[in-house]
Amino acid sequence: MYALFKPFLFLLSPETAHRVTVFFLDLAAALPPVRWLLKRWYCLENKSLERGVLGLRFPNPVGLAAGFDKDGKHIEGLACLGFGFVEVGTVTPRPQDGNPRPRLFRLPADRALINRMGFNNEGLEALVARLKKYRETTPPGAGPVIGGNIGKNKTTPNEEAENDYILCFEALFPWVDYFVVNVSSPNTPGLRALQEKEPLTRLLNLLQEKNNAKSAPKPILLKIAPDLSDEQLDDIASIVRDTGLAGVIATNTTIAREPLRTTPAEIEKIGAGGLSGAPLRERSTVVIRRLRELLGAEPVIIGVGGIDSAAAAQEKLAAGANLVQVYSGLVYEGPSLVRQILKNIPH
């Protein structure tokens, strides 16, 4: 069905196409007969697909990466598409518009996207209100696992970034199942400097201190960039061990631009931003494999980057990922991608 609509969606700008898509998804999910049909088409309910990861029960190992539903507006609709988990955010304490448009670009020849969204979101208060309403109206154990991806506001200097992450952590704690600390987006100036060993260790220790003071601590993961050197990956593994972090999400978008089929002139015209999609597949898998070697069996790795087929998902799992996430692949394959992966990975 998506194949029929895709040419029309690709006539629209990527952001407009996204808004149109989620509008109709929400509309469909609000109508019980249509919601039932969507679940029949897209959901693959099979007990053998369940995963016990992070001390949580995941209905299946395929999730939606952060960025698609920044403000937690579409969880009910996304639950109809078969996701085992949905990661909301990246959220910042205060609302922000993000970078000027256009800021999202398709690269059809490469089955890829470039974005420089800049953490556009409605802010922490709005997300908390939506998650609270969702939790209060959804039976326990129903729906996907929900992760909260947290970041800092653009106007917050790096020296004060810890305050933003703590604010997000405390406010979201009752409403999400796990947390992701995002210090790896290339679209907030200076953010990736927080991946350096000293500031990152300090930030994660502070969050873990707050977490361990709770009666029932929740898993905290770190989302990293694919552009880290082997030495930096060694540091990440050391930090994960030293801070007792639950695991890593590998990887965010890349600032690299090779190799691409899209012409250099087109790439130059698009400008800055993080590249996602098929060109990221190999590098993200390399990072996952390296991290698994460094971390051993226990810390969790969620693999993301270039997953647009069951084969790509299985590649991540074979490299050492416990779970996988998709995003850009949905743009090119449509919502049936989730079911396709689940039908073809080992149960």
Image (tube, rainbow, N blue to C red):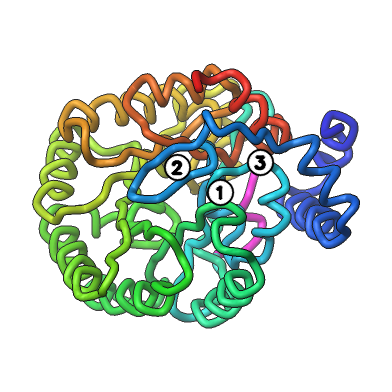
Does residue 304 show up?
A: no
Q: Is residue 290 left or right of residue 241?
A: right
For disc 1, the marked residue is 115
Percent position of residue 98, x then y? 55, 67
Is disc 2 in contact with disc 1, using a CB cutoff of under 8 Å? yes
Instruction: Give the residue displayed 46% in from the left and 65% down from the top.
Output: 176
Mark 1 vs 3: CB contact within 8 A: no
Q: Position of residue 154 (x, y in %)?
A: 41, 71
* Residue 121, image x, y percentages: 56, 70
Residue under pointer 2: 253
The disc, 1 or 3, on the residue closer to the chain's N-terminal end is 3
How packed mark 3 is, by other alpha carbons closer than 10 Å (few <14, some 14-19, many 20 or more), is many
Name the dominant secondary structure of the magenta segment: loop
Q: Which residue sits at x=53%, y=60%?
A: 88
Magenta-colored stretch includes residue 103: yes
Q: Which residue is mark 3?
A: 82
